[in-house]
Image (spheres, grey):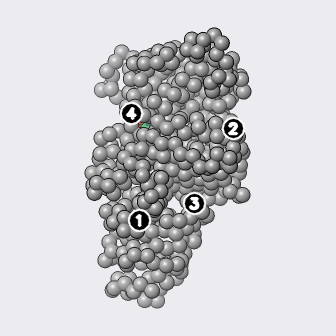
Amino acid sequence: MRIGLLGHGVVGQGVRKIIDAHQTSATAAMSVVRILVRDQSEITDERITTDPEEFFTTDMDVVVECMGGVDKPFEFVSRALSAGMGVVSSNKKLLAHKYDELQALATQRQVPLAFEAAIGGGIPWLHNLALTAQVDEVESFRGIFNGTTNYILDEMFTHGQNFDDALRGAQERGYAEADPSDDIDGHDVKYKTVLTANRIWGVSVPLEQVPALGLRHVDGRDAKWAAAHGKTIKLLGMARATNQGVMAGAMPVMLPANHLLAGIHQNFNCAMVNSNNFGEAAYYGQGAGMLPTAFAVVSDLVSVQALMVQDSFALAAPGRTVVAPMWQEAWGQNASPLSREVASVDQLVSSPAQSLEVAPMDQSALQGKYYLRPENSEDFDLLWDLVEFTRPEKLENGAILTGGVHLPLLMNSLRRAGFTTGVVGDISTLVCEVEDSSAKMVADRGLFLALVDSGLNE
Ligand SMILES: NC(=O)C1=CN([C@@H]2O[C@H](COP(=O)(O)OP(=O)(O)OC[C@H]3O[C@@H](n4cnc5c(N)ncnc54)[C@H](O)[C@@H]3O)[C@@H](O)[C@H]2O)C=CC1
Ligand SMILES: N[C@@H](CC=O)C(=O)O
């Protein structure tokens, strides 16, 4: 199988290395024939070019997209699919933004579009979900889907590093996005959550309806508070099928320290799914980094290769399974499609077992109990801003928050601003019920907040 690589950074180099090593009979049947990069300085091999025309006029069966971004990769991936080439991508931002267009094109051309590496790095998550959904109804999933932020939290909470140093460490190890805001502000987790929901439930969740709260303001005080209350903080992606449809979100969550997800360290991810017969299942592995991510890309290529009998993907009509020559070689002429799971175009293009509506998510997904911490515990101006920001009429005495904090009054204000119930900890940390979308506004105003409990986080 002749492969063209779009991008030769962290992931692209990993894919090229695994294929060039020809370590198994499956990878021995693959070759990387052309690689497109942005800068001349990246040309280290005669296969590498900066010229898209040279790339697309090369004879290729499959294109692997690992460039990052949305517009350019969309142009290139569309071009490859339109030309009848299969596509494997690790780019969740592209896929989440252009899901409908790309799925439609792949379906129309009957070519595979596979993206296992886009969610959970090396973890065979979509693969296992596809199997689960063929037997069970999937009720919900949640998990740690970002290696960078898990690495940052782990370094801060376990080793006492500060945020900036921990982020630098994640970048040096190749875990972070080119613009790490996507990791830190929860967008990357949102893309992965939306893509997973789309695949399981046959929906097309509009990105703008899914709340994403990140970790930009987390610091050592939060680690201390969490430890003192027998908890730890993790950034989770969560989705649930409800009577109204699919509900999804991405946000920091205070988990009990003995929770399975609380024990996930470094760049590892752990994705948990709940289905009616199997119950709760968890999939664990490295969620970012060169070789783990490239492993998932190449595992998709193995599935695509299985479709390539003789000359054409068209031979593998929807629903029909095929045995590629290399499988026959490995297991003998009598190998039956039933003796192993064999990829079909259906499985790689789109075959949701369920098909649900999308629920309005702006309000309900954010409802719950939150931990809140202002940047400066002596300065409650920010909370005052919040109070002003979330309710139309001013409090009578603006001095309460600037000239010494009066807790009952503060809580009263918060309550009127949409927060209800209780205070936990000292005056610098609050745990409040949030009844509306105030949580997003609070995060935007510079307070760190983490979900303690909500309908999504059961
Ligand atoms: N680094 C990781 O651990 C993981 C990354 N991903 C995703 O994989 C994709 C690639 O990530 P990395 O390899 O880390 O990025 P990177 O920044 O290391 O490499 C990007 C490559 O794409 C090329 N490129 C970018 N724009 C281009 C353009 N307009 N024309 C030609 N070449 C272009 C660059 O020259 C470079 O070779 C991203 O979508 C990322 O979100 C997914 C899972 C894990
Ligand atoms: N930046 C991402 C890369 C993998 O998807 C992460 O840290 O998880």
Tell us which disc is closer to us: 1 or 3. 1
SS under mark 4: helix
Q: Return the residue nearer the eye: 364 or 400.
A: 364
- Residue indicated by mark 4: 290
- Percent position (x, y) of residue 190? 52, 50
What quarter of the picture does the C terminus occupy? bottom right
**Horizontal arrangement in the rendering, residue 224 relative to residue 201 (left or right):** left
Q: Nearer the viewer, residue 327 or 245?
A: 327
- The residue identified by callout 3 is 458
Q: Earlier in the sequence, mark 2 or mark 3?
A: 2
Three-letter amino acid code of the residue under disc 1? Gly
Q: Which label's residue is closer to the chain start, 2 or 1?
A: 2
Identify the residue under disc 2: 134
Mark 4 or mark 1, earlier in chain: 1
| First in sequence: mark 4 vs mark 2 | 2
In the rendered view, does 113 fall on the left or right side of 66?
Answer: right
Disc 4 and disc 1 in contact, CB within 8 angstroms: no
Quadrant hosting residue 444: bottom left
For the residue with label 4, is its CB less than 8 Å from the closest atom of ligand 1? yes
